[in-house]
Image: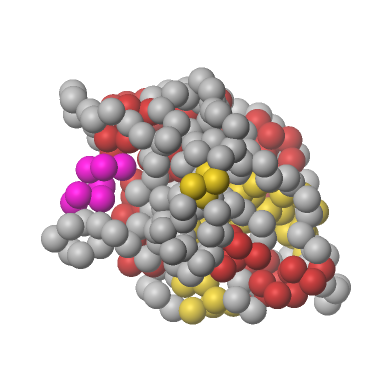
Amino acid sequence: MTTSSDAAPAAVAVPADNDKVNPVDFSGSVRTDNKIPSKDTLKRVADMPILDREGKTHTFKSLYEEHIGRTLILFVRHFFCGNCQEYLRILSQAIPPAALINAPTPTQIIVVGCGDPSLIDLYLEASSCAYPVYADPTRRLYDELGMVSTLALGSAPGYMKHTNIWSSSWKSFIQSVKQIPKGMALKGGNQRQVGGEFLFENKGDGSDVPVTWCHRMKNTRDHAEIEDVQDLLGLEKTEPEAASVKVADAQTKDAAPTPTAAE
C-alpha cells in the first residue's frame, strides 16, 4: 500500500477480494491509457442502467442522447472519497453551470459514482457539487469503459492544492462513521475503483453519439486537471475561490489519523 504522495512503486497485482468487476488491483499507479471507447463498447454500455438520487433507473445513453451538444461525464470513486469531493468542489467553482451556457458548444457536466444512490444527497452537500450526480453501484460501466482499480495515491495534483491528504482522509472517515447508524457506512462504493472523464458529442442528427475525448485515472488522485477541462471545453480559465480552503478546514478536526492510499 502506498503511503507517500510523492512517488508510487511499479504496478504489482494483489488479491482482489473476490471482486468480479475490475478484478485485478494494484499497489502502484496502473498502466492504463486514454484510448477512445470503440463503437461496439458504446453500444454495449448505452442501455446499461444508472440510478438517480431517488433510486430511479435510467439508461446510460439518456445522459448524453437527450442533450444536443457536448456532455462531459465524470466518473468518480466511492461516495466518501474526500479527494473526489475536493475535485468536484474546485471544478464547480471554476466551471459553474452558468459558464457552460457561454461555452462555444452547448455543454453539460454529469457525475457518476459507484456507491448506493441513497448517498447522492450527502455527496452533493459534502462536495458542493454543482452538477447532477448518478450512481452505478454495479460498476459495470466502469469496467466496460476501461476504468481500473488501484489504491495508489499518486503525486498530488493541482486541484488538491486547496487542501491536503490529512484533512481529506479525516473528512472521508467521519462521513462514513456518521452513516453507521443508518447502515450505509459500507455503501459508499468500492474503495479500489478509480474513474475518469468522457466527452460525448451529440450532433442532434440522429447519428450515434461518439466519445471524442477521454481520460482514465491511473491512481486515486488522477482526475483531469481543472485547466485541462477548461481548455477542452473552450472556457476562460478562472482561479477557484480560496473559500474552498475554509470549507475543508471547517470539516476537519485538529487531530487526524494517518492517511492511507485507500482514501
The residue lying at 31 percent from left, 55 percent from top is: 122
Q: Is residue 60 magenta?
A: no
Q: Is residue 48 above or below residue 248?
A: below
Q: Is 156 positioned to the left or the right of 65 in the image?
A: left
x and y, in percent, of residue 253 in the image = 19, 29
Q: Is 256 positioned to the left or the right of 99 in the image?
A: left
**Quadrant that contains the C terminus:** top left
| Outermost residue, top side | 6
Instruction: Say whether residue 127 is visible.
Output: no
x and y, in percent, of residue 103 in the image = 72, 46
Q: Is residue 176 magenta?
A: yes
Q: Is residue 206 above or below residue 12?
A: below
Could you tell me how many numbered marks the image carries?
0
**Quadrant that contains the N terminus:** top left
The residue lying at 32 percent from left, 27 percent from top is: 166
> Could you say which is closer to the camera, residue 216 or residue 9?
9
Q: Residue 209's image quarter?
A: bottom right
Q: Is residue 173 above or below residue 135?
A: above
**Extent of the magenta region:** 172-178
Main structural element of the magenta stretch: helix, strand or loop? helix
The residue lying at 60 percent from left, 28 percent from top is: 238
Instruction: Say whether residue 5 is visible.
Output: yes
x and y, in percent, of residue 42 in the image = 74, 69
The residue lying at 85 percent from left, 74 percent from top is: 207
What kind of colouring is applied to the model shown?
A: secondary structure
